[in-house]
Structures are given as structure tokens and as C-alpha cells.
């Protein structure tokens, strides 16, 4: 991924070599993420899956590609970014969410979706991928070598009351073995939370900023 550019439309993710992209001679490779489902009442309506974003997370020395959308989250390998290594359905299809969380009525027209992701390292030395959802919850995916597995869910209300809009961690510090491994999250209702990853099954909320005056679009963490 260090030599490629990944970019997303509402329906697919495309990869192209960086040199070709800069030279405007790129022939992108499609990851064939979704397909259109025709609505029988409106032939022009697209009821297929929609991609919300694409990002990378650092796992060891590799950058893995993370695709987030209305069908959940998918993580691709860090070498070619074409081999699927982990997938998890969107919260509305996940039993962990069914009884405990609901997307806010304010944003219900968007449906359920995964919105953002970052990598983290807990006090026990394990690596995780943290994923934010439209329900205001955080999904914690544990990484053991090349094996990804859903380990924990910080449900809505405990994480955020509204859709999570951004996640960040200090990946540079974590890679260098720095003990400061906080993760920050923010939501569309303006709240910012700083988390301390004690282990993959225990994230402690260290600090909350309830900013109700305006939405919070992005957060960053640096030492």
C-alpha cells in the first residue's frame, strides 16, 4: 500500500500505483466491493451497498486497507490490498447491536453504517483495530499476527450517543513502544472522548468533552 493510492466512490474502491496516479496514466484495479440492486418500483434507483470511506491502519510494519460502509467493515491485507482478511456485518445485522443500540432518529435516514477506523495498542501489548459506527458504538477488533477477530463492543451510550465521525491514535508513538497509547473519538453531536486501551476487552474513558454547540468532524492524537 505504500506505493499505491486507494480511493472510493459510493459503490466501489479503486487501487492504482502511485507513480501512475501522479502521471495521470493510471488504470485502477477495482476491488469489486458492491453491486447495484435494482428497485422494481424505480429502475433508476440504486439500493445497493454504499461505501462511507476507505482508510489504512498500521499493523506491525504493514498498512492494511480498511473499507467502511453500510454493509459493515472489511480489512484487506497490507501487501496487495486485494485479499480479504476480515469482515464484519453492519450493526443492524449484528446480534451484538440488535437488542442494545439503535441509530439516532436524527440520522436514521442514513441507515446503519461503519464510519471510521484507527489502529491501537493496549497496555497488554496487543494490537487492535477500532471501528466507529452510526449507532455511536465502537467495535474492537483484536489482531494476533495475521488473524483478526471481533473481541469487544463498546455500545452506544457508553461510547457515544450519536454517530461516531472520527477516530485517531498516535500510531507513531505506538510503533516506537511509547507507553502513551490513547485513542480519541468524536461524534456528530460534538462530543470528544479520550480512551485508554487497557486490553482488547477493556477501554477506559479517561476524559469527555460534551460539546453540544456544533458537530465534531475530526480528531487527532499526537504524544
Image (cartoon, rainbow, N blue to C red):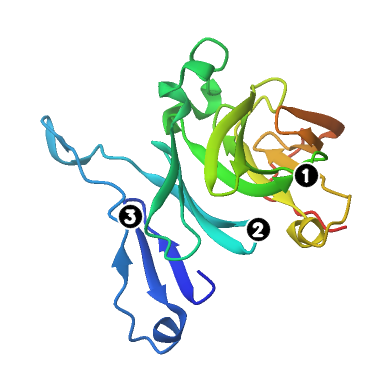
Q: Secondary structure at mark 2?
A: loop
Q: How packed is label 3: few (under 14 Cα within 10 Å), some, or many (20 or more)?
A: some
Which residue occupies the foreground of this view, 57 or 39?
A: 57
Q: How packed is label 2: few (under 14 Cα within 10 Å), some, or many (20 or more)?
A: some
Residue where numbered disc 2 is placed: 60
Do the residues bearing badges 2 and 3 touch, measured as CB atoms within 8 Å? no
Is 121 located above or below residue 210 in the figure? below
Residue where numbered disc 3 is placed: 12
Please identify the quarter of the rendering in which residue 222 is found: bottom right
- In the image, taking residue 138 as reference, residue 74 lies left or right, namely left
Is 18 located above or below residue 119 in the figure? below
Q: Is residue 217 visible to the viewer in this orientation of the structure?
A: no
Is 84 located above or below residue 108 in the figure? below
Task: Indicate which disc, 2 or 3, sits on the residue closer to the N terminus.
Answer: 3
Is 6 located above or below residue 93 in the figure? below
Q: Secondary structure at mark 1?
A: loop
At a point 50% along the width and 61% down the height, the residue shown is: 78
Query: Disc 1 to disc 3, how far (Cα)?
Result: 35 Å
User: Can you give x and y, in whole percent of width and height, for residue 77 in the image?
Assistant: 46, 56
Please identify the quarter of the rendering in which residue 17 is found: bottom left
Task: Indicate which disc, 2 or 1, sits on the residue closer to the N terminus.
Answer: 2
User: Can you give x and y, in whole percent of width and height, for residue 63 in the image?
Assistant: 57, 62
| Pair 2/3: label in front | 2
| Pair 1/3: label in front | 1
Q: Is residue 158 visible to the viewer in this orientation of the structure?
A: yes
Amino acid at each position: 500500500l505504500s506505493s499505491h493510492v486507494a480511493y472510493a466512490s459510493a459503490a466501489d474502491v479503486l487501487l492504482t500505483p502511485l507513480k501512475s496516479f501522479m502521471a495521470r496514466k493510471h488504470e485502477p484495479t477495482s476491488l469489486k466491493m458492491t453491486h447495484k440492486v435494482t428497485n422494481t418500483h424505480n429502475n433508476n434507483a440504486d439500493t445497493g451497498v454504499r461505501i462511507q470511506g476507505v482508510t489504512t491502519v498500521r499493523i506491525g510494519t504493514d498498512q492494511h486497507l480498511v473499507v467502511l460502509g453500510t454493509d459493515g467493515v472489511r480489512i484487506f491485507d497490507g501487501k496487495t490490498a486485494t485479499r480479504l482478511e476480515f469482515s464484519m456485518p453492519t450493526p443492524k445485522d449484528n446480534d451484538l447491536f440488535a437488542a442494545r443500540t439503535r441509530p439516532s432518529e436524527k440520522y436514521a435516514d442514513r441507515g446503519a453504517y461503519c464510519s471510521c477506523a484507527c489502529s491501537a495498542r493496549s497496555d497488554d501489548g496487543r494490537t487492535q483495530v477500532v471501528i466507529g459506527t452510526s449507532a455511536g458504538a465502537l467495535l474492537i477488533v483484536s489482531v494476533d499476527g495475521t488473524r483478526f477477530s471481533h473481541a469487544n463492543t463498546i455500545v452506544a451510550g457508553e461510547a457515544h450517543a450519536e454517530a461516531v465521525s472520527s477516530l485517531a491514535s498516535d500510531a507513531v508513538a505506538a510503533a516506537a513502544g511509547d507507553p502513551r497509547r490513547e485513542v480519541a473519538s468524536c461524534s456528530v453531536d460534538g462530543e470528544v472522548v479520550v480512551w485508554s486501551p487497557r486490553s482488547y476487552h477493556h477501554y477506559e474513558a479517561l476524559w469527555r468533552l460534551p460539546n453540544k454547540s456544533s458537530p465534531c468532524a475530526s480528531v487527532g492524537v499526537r504524544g
